Amino acid sequence: MSNAIEIIPYGRHQLDQDDIDAVVDVLRNGWLTQGAKVTEFENAIASYCGAQYAVACNSGTAALHLAMLAAGIGKGDEIVAPAITFLATSNSGAYVGATPLFTDVDVSTVQMTAELLEPVLSENTRAVLPVHFAGYPCDMSQIAPLVRKKCPDAVIIEDACHALGAKHADGTTVGSLKWADMTMFSFHPVKHIATGEGGMILTDRKDLAYRLRLFRNHGMTKDASLLTKPKEGPWYYEMKDLGYNYRIPDINCALGLSQFKKIDGFVARRQAIAARYHKELANLPHVVIPSPENELGSSWHIYCLQIDYQSLGKSRKQVMKELMAKGVGTQVHYYPVPLQPWYRENYGYKEGDFAGAEKYYSQALTIPLFPAMTDEEVKRVIDNVFDVIKRIV
């Protein structure tokens, strides 16, 4: 009989029988790729967010790359992202030959702000990518007007990989495109809904939607109104630009559609867990919980503590090891992107360039949060974090 402790991971998907049935139905009866489920999935997300167009693809990274291609970003252009994000945000600019620049982040919210963004903008800025870190939306009401005023030719691309189901401060849904030209989501298994791998870009601009779809499918079209030889035959297509195979299979979209029917419940459960963490971890010594203002509107992809390891007298490695021994998995989101070796070597970034991001990273620790967590598991996390950090007596 095993005495191994069951590990609670920092994040995990939740699949029910209806999700399995939806995928099996496609396997038995439908198209495996380029079928009706793709359009159905796109329409569902667009309607939920209030966007006119949605273009699904095979990953969040592909979504970001497609956004750059659709916007015509290229060599000589600059794109701006926050220093704390996943690699794909800024990599998407590098993919098309643009120069990735970075803003520092506000330590309390771990986000780009208008104040931090302004000195990075220039006449060469062609794209700004605010990241709704951890599920809490940036203050787009300040960021967007600044970009529109200083860089009228730039596109605003919201990286909302963490924020499906989140609300801006004015109550509008992330993805409604009130302040952005494009908003993209990820459907990786630890995100709010899972397709296995998958991504989507929303836009209200018909021209961008056309280009997104073109680049998603090898740059080719069968639209008779766009062909140089429209009477060639029904088999005929033309490659209008250099595109990619970023298509998402119907299998993935069937899973995404089934998962999406439960999005409100998933988000509500995440918010309930976060609220309990806020209440019970608020007075833990050496620890700063996410800013209370993050509660309103956040869809809580992850819950990131900031721990003063020096005053605690333990290293992060030691804290993570002790928690793992008690069955609590943790992670760190993220090491500052511009300090990654490739960015240092190619763009000359160095330690000290991003004080806020570096301070946040030095203290960051993500604890478990996902809808399938039971109340007992939430209690286990809280109790064991207290045990490792030292309970107040």
Image (spheres, rainbow, N blue to C red):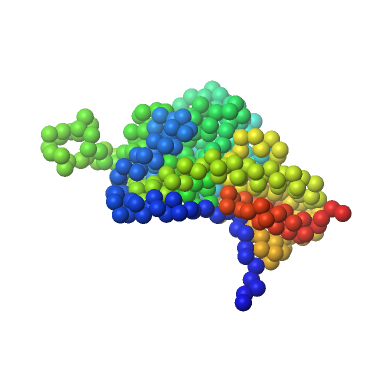
Residue found at the far left of this picture: 232
Residue drawn at x 64%, y 71% as measured from the top left: 4
- Quarter of the image for residue 271 reads top right
- Which x, y percent locates residue 336? 61, 48
Taking depth in this image into account, of 22 and 324 the one nearest to the observer is: 22
Quadrant where the N terminus is found in the figure = bottom right
Check the image and report above or below for 325 versus 389. below
- Which x, y percent locates residue 161? 52, 43
Residue found at the far bottom of this picture: 1
Check the image and report above or below for 350 versus 322. above
- Which x, y percent locates residue 282? 77, 45
Viewed as shown, does residue 36 lie left or right of 152?
left
Viewed as shown, does residue 27 lie left or right of 96?
left
- Quarter of the image for residue 96 reads top left
Viewed as shown, does residue 371 lie left or right of 77?
right
Residue found at the far right of this picture: 393
Residue drawn at x 58%, y 52% as measured from the top left: 372
Residue 63 visible in the displayed image: no
- Quarter of the image for residue 97 reads top left
Residue 53 visible in the displayed image: yes
